[in-house]
Amino acid sequence: MRIVYVSLVSLALVLALLAAQCPGPAQPTTAPAQPTAAPANPTPAGLSGRISVAGSTTVQPLAEKLAKAFQAQNPNVQIDIQGGGSSVGVKSAGEGTANIGTVSREVTKEELQKYADLKVFIIAQDGIAIVTHPGVPVSNLTKSQVRDIFAGKITNWKDVGGPDKPIVVVSREEGSGTRGAFEELVMGKDAVIFDKAILQASNGAVRTTVSTTPNSVGYLSFGYLDRSVKALSIEGVEATEANAASGKYPVVRPLIMLTKGEPTGVVKAWLDYILSAEGQALVSKEGYVKVK
């Protein structure tokens, strides 16, 4: 029995030595991290914050699209956008009640004097189309004819080559950037929109009214054009983005964002995005004329 015991001990020692000399099974290792593609328009790491925007109802839908695209890249940023009109946009930015004010017309000298620290950022150009109910058989007007229609001097379609039907005029309300630009670019200093015009508070409301009111005419931002209304040529030039960009179409105005002082932080980051190649591509996609 003693001899067997010694042999077993010896065998155990031999097996232990052999195990020490043989490599063990391969241990699992963590795969190296794969590099990720950089975003098209990188923004500061960890960008977060909240931006308040108020003003032009023309700029509002474009701003909402630009905000959505920016927030997709920066989920910790919240952008709140409201309308109210261009005058509200100037006041909101000038008084600091909103981080950004939006305007769909030129900012006046008086406004720049009142709010001396306003910073102006033109984000797009926008044409204003003269639109009629689809049943109106008129396709072209001169600027002087448009002016006389909205001033109440021309009141029947037969006077501009159409049927013997009274013209129903639809306009924006006072304080609207679209109205302000229309008055500046079409009406001039001496003509005013006559008091029998149907006034609406937004581009969308004008489009709905014109599309559902026979013999009506109004004016709309290019961004609101669709098949429910008919856009007229002016001086023989069609109301298209290409004609607006080339300067051929005569009724074009800027779309503007305003800040009180130089923008910083997340506000600056969003404005930089809007004026980047990616932001301007979205501007063009939405039917406006890019500025960069």
Image: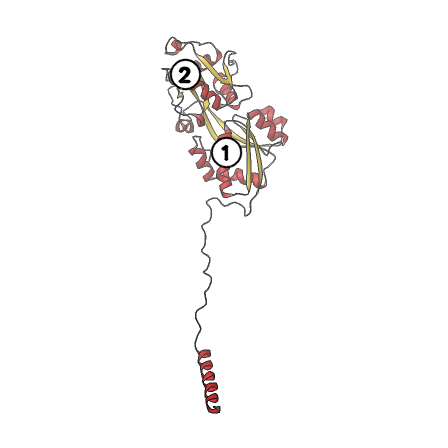
Q: Is residue 68 visible?
A: yes
Secondary structure beneath dot 2 equals loop
Using the image, determine if residue 26 lies above or below residue 292: below
Looking at the image, residue 92 sits to the left or right of residue 12; the answer is right
Give the alpha-carbon distance from disc 1 to disc 2, as whole Å.
Answer: 34 Å
Toward the viewer: 146 or 248?
A: 146
Q: Which mark is residue 64?
A: 1
Where on the picture, by quarter, is residue 208?
Answer: top left
Asked if 15 appears above or below 97 in the picture, the reply is below
Query: What kind of residue is marked 2?
Result: Thr
Mark linked to residue 183: none
Which of the two discs, 1 and 2, sits closer to the camera? 1
Q: Is residue 14 above or below residue 251?
A: below
Q: Residues within 10 Å of mark 1 (few under 14, many from 20)?
A: some
Q: Which secondary structure lies at badge 1? A: helix
Q: Is residue 22 above or below residue 255?
A: below
Question: Which residue extends farthest front?
Answer: 1
Whole-percent x, y for residue 204 in the image? 47, 24
Report the side of 112 relative to 248 (left or right). right
**Residue that numbered label 2 is attached to:** 142
Counting other residues with Cα less than 10 Å from the Cα at mark 2, is it few (<14), some (14-19), or many (20 or more)? some
Specify whether residue 275 is in view.
no
User: Between residues 171 and 260, which one lies in front from this camera angle?
Assistant: 171
Give the residue drawn at x 45%, y 85%.
11
Q: Would you say 100 lies left or right of 25 here?
A: right
x, y (%) of residue 233?
39, 20
Instruction: Kindly identify the amino acid type of the residue bearing the numbered disc 1.
Output: Glu
Instruction: Identify the mark nearer the N-term, 1 or 2.
Output: 1
Which residue corresponds to the image point at 63% horizontal and 30% vertical from the top-left?
95
